[in-house]
Amino acid sequence: MSVNVSLSLASITVFVEGVVRDSSHNRLRFIDDGPIFDSPLVGVADGDDPLFRQYKETIGPYHMTPREVLGHASSNLRRQEPPIVRVVCWILPIAARTRESNALMTKAPSLRWAHTRYYGEQFNDVLRNMVAGHLRSHAAAAVAPATSPLYKSLRGIPGYAASTWSERHAAFAAGLGTFGLCDGFLTPLGKAMRCGSVVTDAPLDVTVRHFASHIEACPYLTRADCGACIQRCPAGAIGPRGHDKQKCEQYQEETLRPLRKRYAVPITGCGLCQTGVPCESGLPRQE
């Protein structure tokens, strides 16, 4: 069966926008039923882009390439080796009211931010599965790595949290942004966001990657300017050399743990370095 030719980046963008706009899962239903995420940005990466091989070195040998993702699932999909592989990626910008509430915080996240961190990722899983289902309904093979049995959380080297698939690195390959000093992902819709992806064999046009390097959008990493996220971090986990993930995790586990009961969520995150900074809702201006 051949892939339905009606599939395109434009049609998938319309589908993703519709889910984000209409899904009841994209609502802060325990607060005021406001949206968790605003309108998304969608892009497509070439699954055979050399970047995905490089990730096995920069992230770890456990990080899967898009072809490995489809290959592991081939017994269920009953498909031969596809001639091409694509990665559909999206950016979900956190709603403005939530960003504004978190920008006012100095030691811990706001209630809206904590609910966004937990329930927002639940919605992101819904979106991942719906995009994969949409592609399969058009005769394409499709796997959402983050919701598949292939996805595993583990401890990387030197002991940092890692996984077999990085949504942010896939988004970089799709040209949707670059990394910043705090390890956040800077996009045209800002750093206060969540991202997701689906691997497919649909012959979609690839998004042009305009960034010359993986740090191009960060003023501090490119010219030692800004550094607002350093001042925003209550854990002192961000400095001139970057983000200390262990110190960040320790702050969340030890200092923010009491908030979980008060906010009625099992995880709160923090997000202070993503709000109240120049890259919160867009790319910082490059002089």
Image (spheres, rainbow, N blue to C red):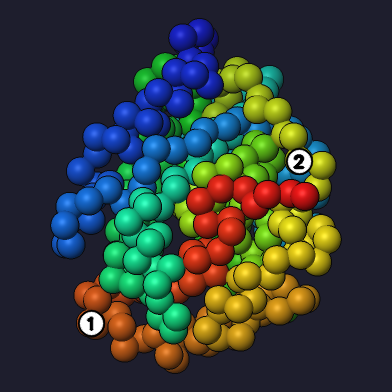
Element carrying mark 1: helix
Residue 81 image point, x, y percent? 65, 25
Total marks shown come to 2
Residue under the point 76% across and 54% down: 215
Identify whether 33 is placed above or below 81: below
Crowd class of label 2 (few under 14; some 14 to 19; many from 20; radius 10 Å): some
Q: What residue is drawn where x is 45% and y is 80%?
A: 106
Seen at 37% across and 20% down, the residue is 137
User: Residue 24: percent from the left, percent from the top?
Assistant: 20, 43
Amino acid type at mark 2:
Phe
Q: Earlier in the sequence, mark 2 or mark 1?
A: 2
- Can residue 282 be spotted in the picture? yes
Give coordinates of residue 66: x percent, y percent. 64, 39
- Which of the two residues, 2 or 224, is positioned nearer the viewer here? 224
Q: Specify the label residue 262 is tagged with.
A: 1
Asked whether disc 2 touches disc 1, contact meaning CB atoms under 8 Å apart, the reply is no
Q: Quadrant of residue 179?
A: bottom right
Seen from the viewer's position, the closer of residues 45 and 283 is 283
| Residue 66 vertical placement versus 46 (above, below) | below
Q: Position of residue 177 (x, y in %)?
A: 65, 45
128 left or right of 285 in image: left
Which label belongs to residue 211? Answer: 2
Are there few (<14), some (14-19), or many (20+) residues within 10 Å of tag 1? few
Type of the residue with mark 1:
Arg
On screen, residue 20 versus residue 286, left or right, reads left
Task: Out of 230 and 178, give the one closest to the viewer.
Answer: 230
Name the mark on residue 35. none
- Residue that extends furthest to the front in the rendered view of this protein: 287
For numbered disc 2, what is the local secondary structure? loop
Q: Residue furthest bottom?
A: 254
